[in-house]
Image: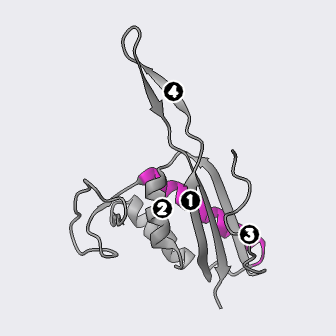
Amino acid sequence: MVKKAYQVQQSFGPKSARAMVKNKPVSLKFTLEIIANVKGKRLDKSLAWMHRILNHEEFLPLRRYHRKVAHRKGEAKRFSKAGRYPERTVKAFIELLELVKANADYKGLDSDNLLIAHAFASQGFSRSSNQSQGRIAGKRRKSKATHIEIIVTEAK
């Protein structure tokens, strides 16, 4: 099924903007870790944090999906020293945050004063292909896809 509706049906009022990307080829696990770090924070600070992850200046702390992940140098971030640099997921999130910022500008909201009120990710379509391996045997490969949605509100 294609995602059509937002997870929350309640309205956040006229001082809110929202955006959604569907079937983005990114990891659901990294997306959920980013959402846990970003929810409730300011939009501009979240964007700056994502750019620092993209430049490998800071790591994404993994709290839920941290098995067999090495520790990083320096202090623990959000009570975790295990972390990664998921570039494809961070790029998709930066694109989504820029999209919701543009939607907020279009609605006449103050884009420097936005808080992330709601963020949600769910599993998208997984497409499969076969990797040839010899004459008869083949290896099935599944590609990842994630639906991501975000709602921002103007802070008072």
Q: Identify the residue at image location x=21%, y=67%.
A: 73
Q: Which residue is mark 1?
A: 121
- Gap between marks 1 and 4, in whole Å? 24 Å
Q: Which residue is mark 3?
A: 9
> Does residue 53 appear to the left or right of 80 in the view shown?
right
Label whose residue precedes the other's in the sequence (1 or 4): 1
Front residue (pair 19, 11):
11
- Gap between marks 2 and 1, in whole Å? 7 Å
Front residue (pair 67, 99):
67
Q: Identify the residue at image location x=34%, y=60%.
A: 56
Q: Is residue 48 visible?
A: no
- Gap between marks 1 and 3, in whole Å? 15 Å
Q: What is the three-letter code of the residue carrying label 3?
A: Gln
Label whose residue precedes the other's in the sequence (1 or 3): 3
From this viewpoint, which residue is outermost toward the top? Answer: 135
Q: What is the three-letter code of the residue carrying label 1?
A: Ala
> Does residue 116 appear to the left or right of 27 in the view shown?
right
Q: Is residue 101 in the magenta section?
A: yes
- Gap between marks 2 and 3, in whole Å? 20 Å
From this viewpoint, which residue is outermost toward the bottom? Answer: 156
75 shown above or below 35:
below
Determine the secondary structure under disc 4.
Answer: strand
Callout 1: 10 Å neighbours few (<14), some, many (20+)?
A: some
